[in-house]
Each structure stands twice: as structure tokens, then as C-alpha cells.
Image (spheres, rainbow, N blue to C red):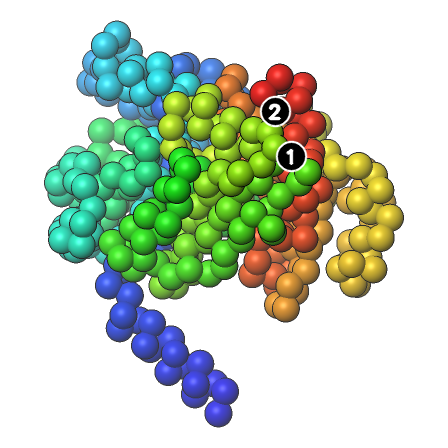
Amino acid sequence: MNSVVANFEEAVKATTDFLPLNGTDYVELYVGNSKQAAHFFQTAFGFQPLAYAGLETGLRDRESYVLVQDKIRLVLTSPLQGGTEIGKHLDKHGDGIKVVALWVDDAHYSFEETVRRGAKPYFEPVVEEDAFGKVVRSGIHTYGDTVHIFVERSQYKGVFLPGFKSWNPAYRPAEIGLKYVDHMVGNVGWNEMLPWVNFYANVMGFNQLVSFDDKDISTDYTALMSKVMSNGNGRIKFPINEPAEGKKKSQVEEYLDFYGGAGVQHIAVATDNIIETVTELQNRGIEFLRVPTTYYDDLLSRVGHIDEDLAPLRKLGILVDRDDEGYLLQIFTKPIMPRPTLFFEIIQRKGAKSFGKGNFKALFEAIEREQELRGTL
């Protein structure tokens, strides 16, 4: 009987999900030096070279390097001339995420349906072709200067997109076990969370998975509020954060100040073995936020039995939390850009569907210690 109910519920979701999304197609960062950024993501994060576009492919205003690891594609784009829109974005925001591209079956429909429901167009559907077939893309604006691009690629067999060529350097550090984008978190300004939650609900058909208020996410000094939005099949999850009143400046306020407005705060990437992945990241020079070692003294009494030994978790600083479905392990890098803005989360889910609510206090106190060192708390 339960399976019948579950199948019925899935059928209802399928009929009401007016914007089917197959997953994250790529994430594009505007960076000051795409060549050096590509080297960093290869060396530190184990991303593999995939494709290139620039002067050698006929572009005159920008160049892009595309990196891949399992289902994650990063595009790193820099301007080649002054006075470009990419350059203006960099001047305002520093290095950061411009595009969260979503893989769809029909980019025309996705654009028309979201614009009809209130989305601001970024660009209308365009067909891009080369010898390997065609791709249709369209785009809409979301919070800040961030955009969503819908990518329809069922008729394309090329390396990435038309206009890109294969990039095959000899330098290829090994992968580190990153699998896919688990979720991406956006920071928005004061009183902007609910409008953007409504945008994802009404314009893109997302549902609210969970909500956290300033009682859930607070320390003695700072607070924030967050709501997690997910598309119909659960492959795309976008938590939206806004500041809340506290005694001192919150991490979201610090982000907004240095980024120059709303934007993507962090990308959570999944792994099947967080101990191996984080060990390799640390060996390659990535720095992580650390909680006090006392966090581990009563960990098992808080979360119950876990498969992993406690010693490596304590050594690496990996956090653990449990919900009704299971548990998860997570850790957060320090900001990877000059400004204290974008960072990565490494996450391994052992059944849990949540986002580590039990770790919020310890995590945000660790962030505050970093803010204090920066003089921005």
C-alpha cells in the first residue's frame, strides 16, 4: 500500500512540475585570470581539463576554460579587453559565480514558461551549432547579478558547447572523488529572502524543503535566516540566506559588503568518501574552517552510531549530523577568493536529506573566529 501511495505522489509531482530540470549543467565563474584559476582547480580540487574557448577559437573579448570531475562542470571565464561586461562584474564582485546553468529538455519552453510567470529575461533562446550538432540555450535573471541559463543539449555530441575545442594539456593531477553538486547557497540582502523564495516557488516551481530562523542559526553575536528550495525531482537545491539582527556583523552581511550585493555564497559538492577527499584536499593546500576539538567529545551521544572512526574525523575537522533518514558528514573550506565571499562545502550523505542543522552553532562560531581575524565581525 505504501508503494502505491508513493507512486501516486510521484505521479502528482510529475504532473505539477511545470519546469522539469535534469540537473546542474555547468557553473560559470567570472575570474580575473582564467588560466591561473584553471590551474588552481586542477591542482587543488582535482578537476580535469575538458574544453577551451578564446583567441584560438575566434573569440576576442573573453576566454574560458572548462573543467570536469564526474558530473561537475566548472567554466572559468576572464575578459580579454577592458570595458567589458565581464570586467565590470569583476570590478564590482571580484571573482565569483555568474551562471548557474540548468540542464533541460526544452530551452525554449523553459524560457517562455518562466518569463510568463515573472522572470526577467537574460537572453532569449538561441541555437548554437557546429560540426558536432546543436545546443539551444536561454537565460533568466535571479538574485543579484546571478543568472540561470537553460541548456538543451540532446542533439549535441561535442566536447562542451559549440565554439569550444578540446583542451588536452599534459598536466593532469588526479581526481579527488568529487561526484556532483549537492546544493548551492545564495546570500541575499535584508528582507529579500521571502521574495526570492517566492520567485523559486512561483516562477520555477520549486518547493520549500526546510526553513531555519535566527533561533536555529545564531551565536552570541550573529544570526541569519535560511529557506531551502528544491525542484520537483530534488536534483536542484538552492538554500537562500538573509541576515538577521545580531550584536555584530553576520557572515551574510560580510559577504554582501565584499561581494557588492547578493550572490552565490558556496557550492556543496558530494563525495562517497569524505575522509579520503578532505585528506587529499588538505594535502593539496586547501584550508578548512575548524571547530574546537571539544565538538567531538560528545559527538556519538548526539548523533548515534556512525560507520566512520572518530579519530580521522577529529583530525580533519569533519562535522557530523543526523536526521530521520540517516546522517551526513560535512566540512567547509575557507574562502577561496581574495574577498571573503565564495567557498566550498564537501558533503557525504549516509541517508540524511537535511543540511546539518545540528552543526550550525559550531560552524558559525568558527566563521566568526575567521571574521575577527579579518577585522569584519
User: Can see residue 30?
Assistant: yes
The residue drawn where x is 27% and y is 70% is 16
Crowd band around label 1 with a 10 angstrom C-alpha radius: few (<14), some (14–19), many (20+): some
Decide which of 295, 267 is in the foreground and name it.
Answer: 295
59 displayed left or right of 343: left
SS category of the residue bearing label 2 = loop
> Number of marks in the image?
2
Q: Is residue 228 above or below residue 262?
A: below
**Of the numbered discs in the image, which one, if any, rests on residue 19?**
none
Q: Position of residue 296 (x, y in %)?
A: 82, 47
Type of residue at label 2?
Leu
The answer to whether the residue labelled 2 contacts the one labelled 1, judged by CB atoms less than 8 Å apart, is yes
Is residue 160 visible in the rendered image? The answer is no
Q: Quadrant where the C terminus lies?
A: top right
Q: Residue at coordinates 35% horizontally, 18% vertically from top-left?
A: 92
Give how far apart the Cα atoms at labels 2 and 1 are.
9 Å
Residue at 56% over, 47% down = 214
The front one of 277 and 262 is: 262
Q: 165 or 46, which lies in front?
A: 46
237 on left or right of 303: left
Q: Position of residue 82 (x, y in %)?
A: 26, 7
- Residue 107 lies, with reference to residue 188, above or below; the image says below
> Which callout, 2 or 1, points at the residue further toward the start of the chain?
1
- Is the residue marked by circle 2 packed among few (<14), some (14-19), or many (20+) residues within 10 Å? some
Nearest to the observer: residue 84 or residue 154? 84
Left or right: where 298 falls relative to 125: right
- Name the secondary structure under disc 1: loop
Mark 1 belongs to which amino acid?
Answer: Tyr
- What residue is pinned by disc 2? 377
On the image, the x and y values in percent for residue 178 come to 56, 43
Q: Which residue shows up at 50% across the image and 87% down it?
A: 2
Q: Which residue is mark 1?
A: 221
